[in-house]
Each structure stands twice: as structure tokens, then as C-alpha cells.
């Protein structure tokens, strides 16, 4: 589904008069979730070498749809697929989404 299709569906579902209202609504919801994810990402400290990954925690829930999680991976050794040499992979923060059981049951 493209953003335009989502805007049209939102306009129909909410009975909005114009697409501009639907775009503003969609953008506002996106901005709220982005702020919540950024806030959670700032609070999570990246693990140092030798430490395990930080357990992901629920940041933002979409009731009846699913949850967004923010966590951090530990630094590790990786392999360059081109030449097979060992490389260091930095620790990084990750965002994941898990669909609610009610949604997966309907698919």
C-alpha cells in the first residue's frame, strides 16, 4: 500500500472532506510515533564489546495492530562476503515491530 492509497483509505474511513486533512492526520500520527522511538533510542545505551545485546522494550503500541520495540545489538565480528576477511561490526540501535495476535489470526 502506498502513502497515497493509505491517505485515500483514511479519508474514506474517517469521512474527511479533503485529502489534505487525511495527509495531515497521517503525518501527525507518524510524527508522534517517531518522537516516541527517538526518545526511547536516546535512553538505550549501546552495549560494549563482550556485553550481550540490550533486550528490546516496547516503545509504542498500536492497539489492535502491534507494538514497536527499540533495542541495541552488541558489537561483533563479521565476515566480508567478497574476500572472506574478518571485520568489526559496530553496536547499533534497532527498531522492530511485532504484529498483534489478532492481526496475524486474520491473515
Image (tube, helix red, strand yellow):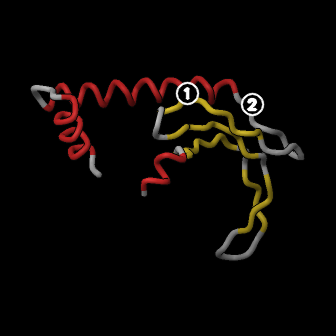
Return the mark for residue 78.
Answer: none
The x, y position of residue 15, in whole percent, is 15, 28
Determine whether 52 is above or below 81 in the image: above
Outermost residue on the bottom side: it is 83
Determine whether 71 is above or below 39 in the image: below
- Along the line of sight, the residue nearer the viewer: 101 or 48: 101
Determine whether 85 is above or below 54 in the image: below
Of callouts 1 and 2, which one flags the residue occurring earlier in the amino acid sequence? 1
Label 1 SS: helix
Determine whether, in the image, residue 48 is placed left or right of residue 5: right
What residue is disc 2 on?
45
Q: CA distance from mark 1 to mark 2?
A: 13 Å
Residue shown at the point (21%, 44%) measured from the top left: 4
- Along the line of sight, the residue nearer the viewer: 107 or 66: 107
Determine whether, in the image, residue 44 is placed left or right of residue 98: right
Residue shown at the point (69%, 39%) measured from the top left: 56
Which quarter of the picture shows residue 86? bottom right
Q: For label 2, count other residues whose C-alpha is less than 10 Å away and answer few (under 14), some (14-19) or many (20+).
A: few
Which quarter of the picture shows residue 72? top right
The x, y position of residue 64, in whole percent, is 46, 37
What residue is disc 1 on?
38
Quadrant of the image for the C terminus? bottom left
Determine whether, in the image, residue 17 is placed left or right of residue 7: left
- Along the line of sight, the residue nearer the viewer: 55 or 45: 55
Determine whether 22 is above or below 82 in the image: above
Amino acid at each position: 500500500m502506498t502513502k497515497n492509497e493509505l491517505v485515500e483509505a483514511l479519508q474514506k474511513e474517517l469521512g474527511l472532506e479533503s485529502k489534505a486533512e487525511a495527509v495531515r492526520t497521517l503525518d501527525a500520527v507518524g510524527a508522534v510515533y517517531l518522537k516516541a522511538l527517538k526518545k526511547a533510542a536516546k535512553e538505550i545505551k549501546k552495549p560494549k564489546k563482550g556485553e550481550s545485546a540490550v533486550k528490546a522494550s516496547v516503545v509504542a503500541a498500536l492497539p489492535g495492530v502491534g507494538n514497536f520495540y527499540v533495542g541495541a545489538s552488541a558489537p561483533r565480528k563479521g565476515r566480508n562476503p567478497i574476500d572472506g576477511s574478518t571485520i568489526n561490526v559496530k553496536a547499533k540501535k534497532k527498531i522492530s515491530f511485532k504484529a498483534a495476535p489478532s492481526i496475524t489470526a486474520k491473515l
